[in-house]
C-alpha cells in the first residue's frame, strides 16, 4: 500500500488518531501524516501510506492555506477557544480599517513565537507538557513566511481571514498577536486547512467515506501516487544500468541533467514509467546522489 490519502479531518480528532485509524483500516504499518492539525481544526490532512511515508518531509515543506475565524475581545492561554481566558477587552470600537492595517504587519517574512500549547520541543519535551503543568518558559521566535493574508469578513467580534503560509506557521499565534496589536486581545475561534501542497479540500475524502471504501475494497480510488508531491521538480528517465546504480545508492551522471541541475532535486523514472525516487544534485561533483530510492 503505497500512496497518499487526502483526508478531510473532522473536528475533535487529533492528527495522530486519524493516522491510527487509517493504520487499522489498511493493515499497513507504515502510516504517517504531513503536518499536524489541532484537534478542533478541520480540513486537509494528507496521510501517507507505505513508501509514501518516505516523502513526508517534502510534503511538510509545501505551502498551506487556511480559513480562520478570529474572535476579538478574549485572549486565552492556548490562543484558541479551548483555553483559559487570560485577557478581556472591548472590540466594539475597532473598525475594519484598523484590522486591515494591523494585518499588514503579519505579511511577508515575519518572526513568530510558538504558543506554549504546541508540539515544539524544549530539551526533548513538547512545550504543551510544560504548559499543562502551569510552566511558562521563554520561547525563541522563528522565521515564517506569510504569502497571503486577507480579511474576508468583519462582523463584531469575529474577523474572518484567509492565510497562505509556509510550514511551521501557527495561525493561533497570528490570532493572538493580532489581538495584542489591537489592544483588546483575541483568540482563534475556528480553523479549516483548505490546501496542503497539491491537496485541496474540495477533493478531500471524509473519514466515513474512507471507512466505507476500505470496507468494500475500493479505497484505491482515493489514493494519490507518491510523486504527485514532487511535480515542481524536473523529471528524468534513466536506463536499466542507471536504475541499478540508484538501487544500490550510488551517485550517477545524467546526459539530460542540464535543465534539472538548476534545481536541488529531480524525479527519476524507469523507461517503463515506474517512479524510482528522488535525486539530489551535487554541483561540485557534477553528479546526482540518490535522496530517496523507492524501487520495489
Image (cartoon, rainbow, N blue to C red):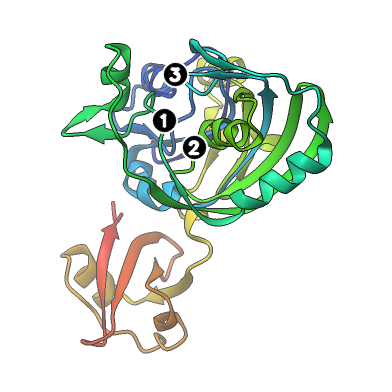
Name the residue located 61 percent from the left edge and 53 percent from the top edge: 107
Q: Nearer the viewer, mark 1 or mark 2?
A: 1
Label 1 with label 2: CB-CB less than 8 Å: yes
Q: Which mark is residue 170?
A: 2
- Other-residue count near label 3 (Cα within 10 Å), few / some / many at <14 / 14–19 / ≥20: some
| Residue 56 shows in the view | yes
Name the residue located 22 percent from the left edge and 34 percent from the top edge: 122
Q: Position of residue 147 (x, y in %)?
A: 61, 55
Q: In which image quadrant can residue 17 be found?
A: top left
> Tag 3 or tag 2, which sits nearer the N-term?
3
- Other-residue count near label 2 (Cα within 10 Å), few / some / many at <14 / 14–19 / ≥20: some
Q: Regarding mark 3 in the picture, which secondary structure is present there? A: loop
Q: Position of residue 223 (x, y in %)?
A: 52, 37
Tell me the CA gap for discs 1 and 3.
Answer: 18 Å
> Tag 2 or tag 1, which sits nearer the N-term?
1
- Other-residue count near label 1 (Cα within 10 Å), few / some / many at <14 / 14–19 / ≥20: many
Q: Which mark is residue 115?
A: 1
Q: In which image quadrant can residue 176 be found?
A: top right
Q: Nearer the viewer, mark 2 or mark 3?
A: 2
Q: In which image quadrant can residue 1 be found?
A: top left
| Residue 151 shows in the view | no
Q: Which mark is residue 158?
A: none
Q: Which mark is residue 14?
A: 3
Q: Position of residue 243 (x, y in %)?
A: 28, 70
**Residue 95 or 227: which is nearer the viewer?**
95
Tell me the CA gap for discs 1 and 2.
Answer: 8 Å
Label 2 with label 3: CB-CB less than 8 Å: no
**Residue 174 or 162: which is nearer the viewer?**
174
Q: Regarding mark 1 in the picture, which secondary structure is present there? A: loop
* Left or right: 168 as drawn, with respect to 129: right
* Left or right: 46 as drawn, with respect to 99: left
Amino acid at each position: 500500500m503505497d500512496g497518499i490519502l487526502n483526508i478531510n479531518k473532522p473536528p475533535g480528532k487529533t492528527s495522530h488518531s486519524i493516522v491510527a485509524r487509517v493504520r487499522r483500516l489498511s493493515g499497513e504499518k507504515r502510516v504517517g501524516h504531513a503536518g499536524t492539525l489541532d484537534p478542533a481544526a478541520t480540513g486537509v490532512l494528507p496521510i501517507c501510506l507505505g513508501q509514501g511515508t518516505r516523502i513526508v518531509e517534502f510534503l511538510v515543506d509545501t505551502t498551506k492555506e487556511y480559513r480562520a475565524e478570529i474572535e476579538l475581545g478574549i485572549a486565552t492561554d492556548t490562543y484558541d477557544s479551548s483555553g483559559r481566558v487570560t485577557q478581556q477587552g472591548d472590540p466594539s470600537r475597532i473598525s475594519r480599517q484598523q484590522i486591515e492595517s494591523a494585518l499588514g504587519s503579519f505579511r511577508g517574512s515575519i518572526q513568530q513565537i510558538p504558543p506554549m500549547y504546541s508540539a515544539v520541543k524544549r530539551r526533548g519535551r513538547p512545550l504543551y507538557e510544560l504548559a499543562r503543568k502551569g510552566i511558562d518558559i521563554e520561547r525563541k521566535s522563528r522565521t515564517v513566511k506569510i504569502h497571503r493574508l486577507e480579511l474576508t469578513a468583519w462582523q463584531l467580534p469575529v474577523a474572518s481571514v484567509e492565510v497562505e503560509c509556509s510550514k511551521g506557521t501557527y495561525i493561533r499565534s497570528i490570532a493572538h498577536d493580532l489581538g495584542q496589536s489591537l489592544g483588546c486581545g483575541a483568540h482563534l475561534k475556528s480553523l479549516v486547512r483548505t490546501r496542503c501542497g497539491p491537496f485541496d479540500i474540495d477533493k478531500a475524502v471524509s473519514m466515513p467515506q474512507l471507512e466505507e471504501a476500505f470496507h468494500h475494497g475500493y479505497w484505491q480510488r482515493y489514493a494519490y501516487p507518491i510523486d504527485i508531491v514532487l511535480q515542481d521538480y524536473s523529471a528524468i528517465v534513466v536506463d536499466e544500468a542507471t536504475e541499478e546504480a540508484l538501487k544500490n545508492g550510488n551517485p550517477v551522471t545524467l546526459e539530460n541533467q542540464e535543465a534539472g541541475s538548476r534545481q536541488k532535486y529531480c524525479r527519476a523514472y524507469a523507461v517503463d514509467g515506474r517512479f524510482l525516487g528522488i535525486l539530489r544534485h551535487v554541483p561540485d561533483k557534477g553528479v546526482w546522489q540518490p535522496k530517496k530510492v523507492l524501487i520495489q
